[in-house]
Amino acid sequence: MSPLSGTIVVVGASSGIGEALAVRLAHDARPVAILARRRDELERIAARANEKVGTTRVHVYEHDVTDRAGIGALWDRIETELGPVDELHYVAGVMPMVEIEAFPTDLDAQMLEVNALGCMAWCNEAARRFVPRGRGHIVGVSSVAALRGRMDRPGYNASKAAQDSHLEALRNRLWRRGVWVTTVRPGPVTTPMTAGMKVPLPITAERCAKGIVRARDRRAAVAHVPWIWRPIMMVIRSIPSFLFRRLSI
């Protein structure tokens, strides 16, 4: 259990990992603000989570992560209604299908906008709020895809690599100020985003959410979910580039 006691914010909670995480965090006996564009889905998730805990603990806030200018005002609103925020989970992400022969800059830009820039904006806002208080925890859900430039999704890999690097830099900057940053790198997770894809070693969104909360509770710097991806990625990262480009991965 986290030593913090304030409001938890989950950005990107309308399906998949974010939904499972919202339901799990509702058991923390703290207010949970869940954010996404689809208000109807958020309402459904909040009702499900609140029914499980028997009280109104999960609260809905409609938000598009590309609206970076509106983050400060929304943060103020959440704190006014629910109390001070001391924990942020950034789970929002997109991964549109890209054919191997296609080079769609518009889709690459969308992935960078949501996966990387949205995370940076929310984490920066959290850092500005947490540092003066000398406490707080930022959890960013990246991906094992951040660790190599795989041929099938260059834009997705790049967006996750940017997110991953930014989280590490924030961790190195903030730990001296009492603020902790955890990077979670899941392997493939069975969600609407991966529907129809053939992926290795898939896990459920619920299992992924459990791993995220465990990483938070341990104040891990970096956590792979499930853990087996840590040695797998150590091997993959050790493959020289001239060999890696010959592999169909």
Image (tube, rainbow, N blue to C red):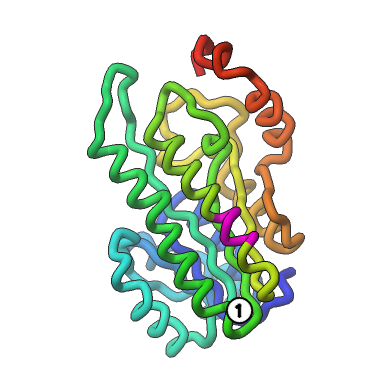
Span highlighted in magenta in the image: 167-172
Asked if residue 82 lies left or right of residue 54, the reply is: left
Q: Quadrant of residue 6?
A: bottom right
Q: Residue at x 68, y 61 (%)?
A: 216
Q: Quadrant of residue 105?
A: top left
* For residue 239, above or below residue 232: above
Magenta: main secondary structure equals helix
Frontmost residue, 114 versus 14:
114
Identify the image quadrant of the N terminus.
bottom right
Q: Residue at x 49, y 65 (%)?
A: 123
Frontmost residue, 114 versus 227:
114
Q: Quadrant of residue 229?
A: top right
What is the count of numbered marks?
Answer: 1
Asked if residue 22 lies left or right of residue 73, the reply is: right
Q: Where is residue 209 shown, x and y percent of the image?
A: 60, 53
Asked if residue 22 lies left or right of residue 183, the reply is: left
Q: Residue at x 62, y 68 (%)?
A: 174
**Does the magenta run of residues contain 101?**
no
Frontmost residue, 134 versus 173:
173
Question: Quick one: SS at disc 1?
Answer: loop
Mark 1 Cα shell of 10 Å, populated few (<14), some (14-19), many (≥20): some
* For residue 38, above or below residue 100: below
Residue marked by disc 1: 30
Frontmost residue, 238 versus 39:
238
* For residue 235, above or below residue 47: above
Kind of residue indicated by mark 1: Arg
Q: Where is residue 45 shown, x and y percent of the image?
A: 45, 63
Q: Where is residue 43 shown, x and y percent of the image?
A: 38, 67
**Does the magenta run of residues contain 169?**
yes
Q: Residue at x 61, y 18 (%)?
A: 240
Q: Where is residue 93 shown, x and y percent of the image?
A: 42, 48
